[in-house]
């Protein structure tokens, strides 16, 4: 599935450039980051927050995921990381519901990587409740548990909140990282995104 919004370079080029990219400090507004018109509230005011806007259906998000996962694992205790799925079309909205469903059933940590693999390696079409439920059952889950979570009021509420937050933060491409609810991280490749995120976190600590 192709997204008609702005996207990065090809995944191959990104990975190649990432290996060659210099370690650039994110200190130039308009180049290393964009400053949002207003700072958005954080889930935990006592911690530095990083949000990833993504979609399971995005090929670039699939490629970025293992790098980001390794980066998150190395973050100190003062950094809070969370992911927000985008809902730009019906298929991606259902994938966002899948994310919140797995979160609700307690299966997100176990099946997160497998969702990416199912869509991008196995080329499965997990774009409606039935196909997602059947896939979930094959992974050892319970169909009734899935249906209850997929159609729960809390899942739909989180979906709406994700949509509103994406609009408020002017997210028009994925993957996108936002630091402290106000710095929209820029970078020509995956490594630059993470390097600039590190620098923005360091800058925020000093403040």
Image (tube, rainbow, N blue to C red):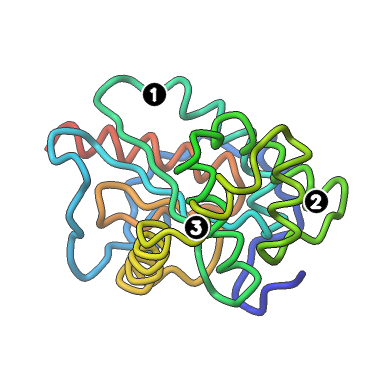
Q: Is residue 175 visible?
A: no
Q: How many labels sit on residues?
A: 3
Q: Position of residue 156 (x, y in %)?
A: 41, 65
Is 184 above or below relative to 16? below
Q: Is residue 128 left or right of residue 88?
A: right
Q: Position of residue 159 (x, y in %)?
A: 42, 64
Query: Of label 3 and label 1, which has the lower sequence position?
Result: 1
Mark 2 element type: helix
According to the image, label 2 marks what residue? 120
Q: Which mark is residue 192?
A: none
Mark 3 element type: strand
Q: Which mark is residue 85?
A: 3
Q: Is residue 122 visible?
A: yes
Q: Position of residue 45 (x, y in %)?
A: 13, 41
Is 52 above or below relative to 159? above
Q: Which residue is at 40% across, 70% downward?
A: 163
| Of the pair 172 and 161, the residue shown nearer to us | 161
- Between circles 3 and 1, the one closer to the viewer is 3
Mark 1 element type: loop
| Of the pair 144 and 88, the residue shown nearer to us | 144
| Of the pair 121 and 74, the residue shown nearer to us | 121
Residues at discs 3 and 2 in contact (Cβ within 8 Å): no
Q: CA distance from mark 3 to mark 1?
A: 21 Å
Q: Residues within 10 Å of mark 2 (few under 14, many from 20)?
A: some
Quadrant of the snapshot with the C terminus: top left
According to the image, label 1 marks what residue? 75
- Between circles 2 and 1, the one closer to the viewer is 2
Q: Is residue 128 left or right of residue 100?
A: right
């Amino acid at each position: 599935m192709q997204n008609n919004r702005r996207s990065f370079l090809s995944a191959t080029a990104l990975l190649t450039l990432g290996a060659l990219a210099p370690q650039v400090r994110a200190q130039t507004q308009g180049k290393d980051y964009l400053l949002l018109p207003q700072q958005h509230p954080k889930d935990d005011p006592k911690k530095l927050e990083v949000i990833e806007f993504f979609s399971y259906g995005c090929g670039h998000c699939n490629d970025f995921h293992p790098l980001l996962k390794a980066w998150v694992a190395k973050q100190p205790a003062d950094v809070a990381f969370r992911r927000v799925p985008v809902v730009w079309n019906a298929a991606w909205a259902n994938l966002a519901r899948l994310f919140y469903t797995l979160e609700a059933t307690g299966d997100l940590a176990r099946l997160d990587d497998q969702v990416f693999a199912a869509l991008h390696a196995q080329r499965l079409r997990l774009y409606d409740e039935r196909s997602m439920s059947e896939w979930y059952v094959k992974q050892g889950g319970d169909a009734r548990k899935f249906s209850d979570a997929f159609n729960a009021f809390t899942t739909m509420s989180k979906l709406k909140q994700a949509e509103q937050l994406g609009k408020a933060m002017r997210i028009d491409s994925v993957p996108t990282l936002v630091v402290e609810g106000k710095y929209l991280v820029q970078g020509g490749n995956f490594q630059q995104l993470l390097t600039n995120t590190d620098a923005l976190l360091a800058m925020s600590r000093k403040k």
